[in-house]
């Protein structure tokens, strides 16, 4: 529950502290005294816009703070507005975001003022009220339907995106097929670019290679005394003869044998190299063409033969995926048809559940309204589809709910938004609130002048209803009716104090008990402070209210 509300330097309120009871709390005061400033303070905590004009003249900042006590667990929320117009929110003394503070409050507080009167007239709100009263059966169906509707919406968006991308997909398919065909036609092999580069360089210098390698072969293979290989063989024979004379030459003689064999092998390699060296101009042209073709592919697809091959593989995989999408489209259409059919079926079940709940809900509201001195009232809920079939579906089903109302006999019910007066709307809201927990499991309800347009016997009944509701839920009610105020467990008065000499005006809030409370009730009854009859009337109202609350 809301244990304490503190307001400092908000417009005309210099400082106000309200320590609230768990049951019914009322706030009264003269018209223009500033009762709405209290609700404005709560509105700031609930996310309303904060402006510099809300800071009391002469003050640097306005602060609104609320302390909640739920079974021993406390929560403090606050909003600060500075003279420069900056706003900050606090949660348990720490700087927080305004949405976080608002979320924390909306779990604990439901606020009903003139805004809620307007919301009551909205068709979506009326459907919410019916669903809330119907409880778990409709809530379960609504959840099931909501999941089906969301699934159908998601599939529909997916299908639209798929179809919308169809033209782009066809262009990409054409490009992928061209790239794959181009690479496959080239028959690129791994590392081919490096091999081509090497062969190309060799062929470009083939004449010099023939000249130099041929010269080396000639020097090695010349059969004259100047021939390198023959010279080695002669040296080998001479050193072998010398070894016979001196065994110490065995080592050099053996090395020379190896050197001769190595030179012989080398000569064979050089001859083979020249045999393999293709100096045919046609071959050289073919290598140049192949090199140019592979270079072009490398520039387009990654810089190397291996990158070209990798691109071809990736393009093939992408091609398969895109071609699969065409098949997926028909599968997606089938899934969407099924999801939409399921949503239509669940929407029809939800509509049937609402239709079954509507008469009992209407009867309950009618009973509450008759208890609020409207003996001839007629109240009903008209349900109608928003359209036909699939077109009727929305996030909350296929239905629109319209509250129809008649306060007088012989007058047919008409939409509540067209016929009800301010007082009738107030009573309708309270009657519905007696049946439906608009704030779900919140512990505090705040009513801003719910008694507008109400008086006489109806005012007493209203007070009784509020007191009965306050037995289970904390209620804070701003009222101008003494018949309501007498039922309060705590009574606060807000007053405006003006000092003409000091040229200041201040709004103060104080709790009244005993004689002070009687004085306020006398004022509310229209009497003067010394009016004995009005005072006795106020005392009698208090006694009757006390007796009505006492079991």
Image: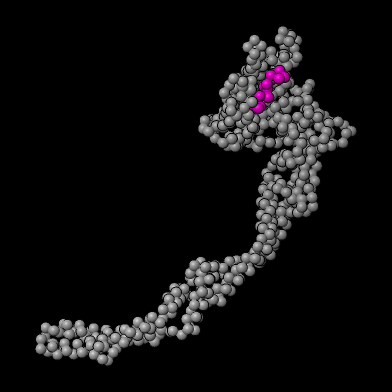
As displayed, is residue 522 above or below residue 450?
above
The image quadrant that residue 439 belongs to is top right
Which quadrant is the N terminus positioned in?
top right
Q: Work out which residue is located at the far left of the displayed protein and give it.
A: 245
Residue 239 in view in this figure: yes
Toward the bottom, the furthest residue is 223
**Above or below: residue 66 compared with residue 202:** above
Residue 421 percent coordinates (x, y): 81, 29
In this view, 208 is above or below 57: below
Find the magenta span and give its range: 25-41
| Left or right side of 64 for 273 | left
Q: Is residue 551 visible?
A: no
Does the magenta portion include 547? no
On the image, the x and y values in percent for residue 282 come to 49, 84
Toward the viewer: 550 or 143?
A: 143
In the rendered image, residue 138, in percent from the top left (x then y), is placed at 70, 45
Residue depicted at x 70% and y 36%: 436
Q: Residue at x 69, y 13 (%)?
A: 519
| Quarter of the image where the C terminus is located | top right
- Quarter of the view holding residue 240: bottom left
Task: Name the residue nearer the viewer: 310 or 10.
Answer: 310
The scheme the figure's colours follow is one colour
């Amino acid at each position: 529950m809301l244990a304490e509300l503190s307001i400092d330097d908000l417009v005309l309120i210099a400082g106000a502290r309200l320590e609230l009871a768990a049951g019914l709390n009322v706030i009264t005061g003269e018209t223009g005294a500033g009762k709405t400033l209290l609700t404005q303070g709560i509105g700031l905590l609930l996310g309303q816009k904060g402006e510099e004009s809300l800071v009391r003249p002469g003050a640097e900042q306005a602060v609104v703070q609320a302390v909640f006590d739920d079974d021993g667990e406390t929560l403090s929320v606050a909003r600060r507005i500075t003279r420069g117009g900056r706003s900050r929110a606090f949660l348990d003394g720490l700087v927080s975001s305004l949405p976080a503070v608002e979320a924390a409050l909306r779990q604990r507080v439901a606020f009903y003022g003139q805004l809620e009167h307007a919301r009551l007239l909205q068709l979506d709100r009326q459907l919410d009220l019916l669903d809330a009263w119907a409880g778990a059966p409709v809530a379960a169906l609504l959840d099931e339907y909501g999941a089906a509707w969301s699934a159908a919406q998601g599939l529909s968006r997916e299908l639209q995106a798929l179809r919308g991308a169809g033209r782009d997909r066809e262009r990409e398919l054409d490009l992928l097929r061209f790239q794959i065909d181009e690479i496959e036609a080239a028959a690129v092999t791994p590392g081919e670019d490096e091999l081509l580069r090497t062969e190309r360089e060799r062929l470009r210098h083939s004449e010099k290679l023939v000249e130099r390698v041929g010269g080396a072969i000639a020097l090695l293979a010349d059969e004259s005394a100047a021939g390198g290989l023959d010279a080695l063989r002669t040296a080998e024979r001479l050193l072998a003869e010398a070894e016979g004379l001196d065994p110490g030459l065995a080592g050099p003689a053996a090395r020379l044998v190896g050197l001769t064999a190595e030179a012989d092998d080398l000569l064979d390699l050089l001859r083979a190299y020249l045999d393999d060296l293709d100096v045919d101009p046609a071959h050289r042209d073919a290598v140049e063409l192949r090199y140019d073709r592979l270079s072009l592919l490398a520039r387009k697809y990654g810089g190397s033969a291996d990158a070209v091959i990798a691109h071809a593989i990736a393009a093939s995989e992408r091609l398969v995926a895109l071609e699969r999408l065409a098949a997926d489209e028909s599968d997606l259409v089938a899934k969407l048809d099924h999801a939409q059919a399921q949503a239509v079926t669940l929407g029809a079940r939800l509509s049937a559940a609402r239709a079954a709940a509507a008469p009992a809900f209407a009867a309950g509201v009618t009973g509450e309204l008759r208890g609020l001195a409207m003996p001839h009232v007629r109240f009903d809920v008209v349900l109608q589809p928003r359209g036909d079939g699939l077109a009727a579906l929305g996030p909350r089903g296929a239905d629109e709910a319209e509250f129809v109302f008649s306060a007088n006999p012989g007058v047919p019910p008409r939409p509540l938004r067209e016929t009800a007066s301010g007082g009738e709307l107030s009573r309708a809201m309270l009657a519905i609130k007696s049946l439906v927990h608009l704030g779900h499991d919140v512990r505090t309800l705040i009513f801003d002048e719910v008694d507008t347009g109400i008086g006489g016997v109806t005012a007493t009944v209203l007070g009784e209803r509020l007191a009965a509701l306050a037995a289970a839920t904390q209620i804070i009610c701003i009222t101008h009716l003494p018949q309501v105020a007498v039922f309060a467990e705590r009574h606060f008065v807000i007053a405006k104090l003006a000092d003409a000499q000091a040229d200041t005006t201040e709004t103060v809030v104080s709790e009244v008990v005993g004689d002070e409370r009687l004085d306020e009730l006398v004022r509310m009854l229209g009497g003067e402070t010394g009016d004995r009859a009005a005072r006795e009337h106020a005392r009698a109202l208090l006694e009757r209210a006390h007796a009505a609350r006492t079991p």
